[in-house]
Amino acid sequence: MKKIILKIDGMHCQSCEKIITMELEELPGISNIKIDSTAGTGELEIDNNLVNERTVLQAIEKAGYKAEIINEDGNQNNSNNGADKEPQISLEKKMVNSDSPFRMRVESTVEAEGSFSSKNDTPNFEGKVKHHKKGEFEVPQGREDIDKIVENLIQSSKISQLFSIFSGDVKSTQSISSGAVLQPPQMPHHDLLPDSSSTKSKGEEHVSLILGGMHCASCAGIIERAIKKMPGVKSASVNFAAEKARVIFDSSVSSVENLISAVDKAGYKASMHEEANTEEESAQKEKQIKSLWRKFIWGAVLSAPMLYFMFLDFFKFLPGGVAFLPYIGIISLILTLPVQFIIGKGFYKGFWSGLKMKTFNMDSLIAIGTSTAFFYSLWQFINYIVANNSVIGLAGAKIPELYFETAAFLITFVSLGKFFEAKAKGRTSQAIKKLIGLQPKTARVVRGSSTVDIPVDQVMSGDIVVVRPGEKIPVDGVIVKGQSSVDESMLTGESIPKEKNIGDMVIGATINKHGSFEFKATKVGKETALAQIIRLIEDAQGSKAPIQAVADKISAKFVPIVLIISVLTFLVWFFILG
């Protein structure tokens, strides 16, 4: 076995490492492959009887990169002894005045300790490279929605990937021995999420679902269990607050339609989350909020007379105190029927869904509690009719032992709570809507000898885009003509414009200041830095913090405990206390 060390050009991130590694693994006689995108090097051992150096170089070129051999020996001295294994990441959240904008600052510092040497006109470095990363978030006071997103982002495992937007590497610490090459920083690669071609196993697919009909954390648990029961599902995480589910499944065994069907069978609604349909998603949430508000208004209108009936028992001077009493029972029954079975229909559906999944949720408590009050009152009302042959109270008295108002009030107030809850959830998506609003709608692209304005989603990688003073840059790219200063505060928080010349990179949604220039589009659509940030925030919203998983487990046991206590209370009250 012979060990060779390679210099590899064109790598930007861990995805590049995996692409090269996968290509080399297909060759016979190759082992101990180590590719380092930060240093721009690679090392491996080859069996000369099965493969030669030329074949190795051709395989790397086939993967889309350029490589050359800088050292060949049998030594095994290239190690990472003494190197830091993990990046040093410092995160800080500050609360600022309510009228201040939200800012995010990301700093990345590389500290190299060692010595340089030159061999065959190739710079070599021996020693350690430490990568210090610092993130600072300024959250306006009173903006709980932004504060929650920042907290989820900090706790998310993808926080370290956020730094890849602003620096050309994703590995934070390297220890390089003799023969390794220290490359200058490469142009930033904006893949916050792993590249599917290199990180997903065959057939593995990630999908995000928008959920509807959830009322509590127990509902989220029911949906999660229903999805996990599907064949081919490897993991599922349901976030009640964001009303989204993230699922990893084997597409050769199951499909998105099967997942949606499983959610439907559990008694809830699900649809595929499309990044382009954010406006449609917001419209659906607005529709849901208005529907909940209408339910509350109708519930309040129908319940208000029963509240007045209750006052008659305590305030005899109120008008109608004598005339209304015989009719309170029949009027309360008529008013409660639509509240119980139309406005409260969703609670029964949630209760039935829980029973099908052999579990209980908050809908179970509301359905059981209101139904007990309603049907007990109905039973008493029917008994009174049979005994007295009258649907109204006799001798000017009201029918006793009726509790229709309890069921009506409970459903009405819970509907109000759901309205406030839905409104609060709607605020969590406002940050994403504002980020999407940063991107310009059109781009000025060179077509032949003329320039034309086209929608930004029609810009393709490789197009030459013209940007005039004061315009927003539509997509990510590299300047090929002209120079200017660019305000990148939407990404970095730095208000001072940054000078840009030929060869410099520009980021979509940043603002061109004084000069005009042309740039070649390199990242478009979902690949732009802005799109990656939006996706990262959505992932943070859709993921669960560890404490949230604990809360879900507690809530799953809360409802059965309440029901058990209720049954014990009834047994003691009825049989022991008489």
Image (cartoon, rainbow, N blue to C red):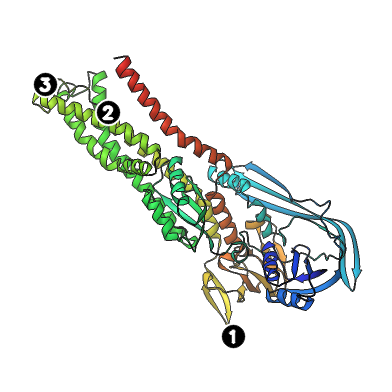
Badge number at residue 449: 1
Residue 56 appears in the picture as rendered:
yes
Precedes in sequence: disc 3 or disc 2: 2
- Which residue is the site of mark 2? 307
Give residue 197's position: percent from left, percent from top: 60, 66
Q: Quadrant of residue 322?
A: top left
Rate crowding at label 1 as few (under 14), some (14 to 19) or many (20 or more) other CA atoms within 10 Å.
few
Horizontal side of residue 538 vs 283, given as left or right = right
- Report the amino acid beneath label 3: Leu
The residue mark sitting in front, 3 or 1, is 3
Task: Residue at 50% x, 39% y: name it.
Answer: 552
The Cα atoms of the two marked residues, 2 and 1, are separated by 77 Å
| Lateral position of residue 336 relative to residue 224, left or right | left
- Where residue 362 appears, as percent x and y from the top left, is 40, 37
Q: Quadrant where the N terminus lies?
A: bottom right
Q: Amino acid at mark 1?
A: Ser
Direction front: furthest residue: 49
Mark 3 or 1, nearer chain start: 3
Q: Amino acid at mark 2?
A: Leu
Badge 3 element: helix
